[in-house]
Amino acid sequence: MNTWSLRLCAALLLSACASGEPGTPAAAAPPAPTPVGEAKCDSRYGNTPRPQTNSLDGVLALASLCTTIYGESLAWTDADGTARAGCLVSGPGAAADKPLPLLVFLHPSLFPMDTLLLTDLLPRQTSADLSGDPTRPGFSLLLVAGRDTEHYYPFPDDTGLGWDNWYRNLDRSSPDLNVDVATIDHFIAAVKERGIVDPKRVYLSGWSNGSAMAELYGLNTPGIAAAAVYSSPNPFGDSTDPCPQAAFGNNKMALLHVGNQCDIIGICDSSEALLKDLRTRGLAAPVESIRVGNLLQEVQGCSALCAAPANPANIIAANQLGTVNHLRWPLGYTERMLNFLREHPLP
């Protein structure tokens, strides 16, 4: 085979690798972290993987309510040997000849995937229009469970269920891929293999730490069309992250963030800074923000009274109003979140 033919074959292989399926294109190169104080960072991926723990909420998570919401329990074992769980609530009549959008929901830290019941997503699951096609109402809903680990959050959220968005290794060719990322990959792939998912309409949502993982994951997973999340800390460097990094990604998805004007540990300010950075650098598009007040009315900007305190020892004591706001789902805004997803499928 001549040199030209070899080059052509190589080009075709590279083109195939950029097919848009999760995990196939080359990962984005993470920028070096900026250590805070004497923090010992991973030179490529920010922080080292968070150690696993045995917390009470981790034990309580074993009693999942998946079957009570007519879901199918899913199981897998990750590369660390940890048993992982998911729950699939298939959309109405989802089949190969009627593929429906797939919405992946990532729960907040300290709370299990049953937190879904505190939202109004489930009542909309059979009728909401995420496809833009009146003959295909509803969507399939995939819940994925996090792990019981240490967190870089103040007490009482320093250990427990959640997502390791601090170890930012999303390189699918790496043997040390973040196991939470691998778990989400696995469950999405398992559902798509059934032929019931519209491949142009795989969406993400989440709450708090789950939103942070949804943003990090979506920005680095081609095949994800859009994300609409609630009350997300900056996954690349919130106020308590010892090894922040500049945002990076290889998937220019659409992103809507719904957040509180007053929230815990400066989430309003840090999330707005991230959204501005994503817009400016073209890492996501479009990037939209909705801010809600204490009474769930729509407002503008962040409250100066709820800025991140210096070295908070206790989330609740640092900002009681922000804590109350953070622990509620933004009822009244879910339809706008779902509409945003519908309007931003893959091309």
Image: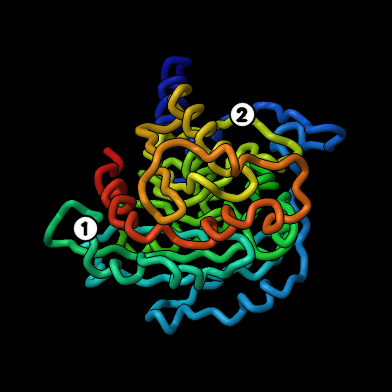
Who comes first in sequence, dot 1 or dot 2?
1
Relative image position of residue 73 (x, y in whole percent): 48, 77
How many marks the image carries: the answer is 2
**Identity of the amino acid at label 2?**
Ala
**Identity of the amino acid at label 1?**
Asp
Relative image position of residue 78 (x, y in whole percent): 64, 62
Q: Which residue is at the front of the view, 52 or 325?
A: 325
User: Which residue carries the number 2 mark?
Assistant: 246
Q: Which residue is at the front of the view, 81 or 341?
A: 341
Q: Is residue 18 above or below residue 203?
A: above
Label drawn at residue 129: 1
Relative image position of residue 90 (x, y in whole percent): 33, 71
**Relative to residue 335, is residue 18 drawn left or right?**
right
Q: Which residue is at the front of the view, 197 or 16?
A: 197
Q: Residue furthest right?
A: 38
Q: Which residue is at the front of the view, 214 or 20?
A: 214
Question: Going 72% across and 62% down the picture, which residue do you hit?
Answer: 156
**Relative to residue 268, is residue 335 drawn left or right?**
left
Secondary structure beneath label 2: loop
Q: Is residue 105 above or below residue 153?
A: below
Question: Going 64% across and 70% down the picture, which residue do you hit?
Answer: 83
Relative image position of residue 255 (x, y in whole percent): 40, 40
Q: Quadrant of the C terminus?
A: top left
Question: Going 44% across and 58% down the picture, which residue do you hit?
Answer: 188
- Residue 156 in sight in this render: yes
Q: Residues within 10 Å of mark 1 (few under 14, many from 20)?
A: many
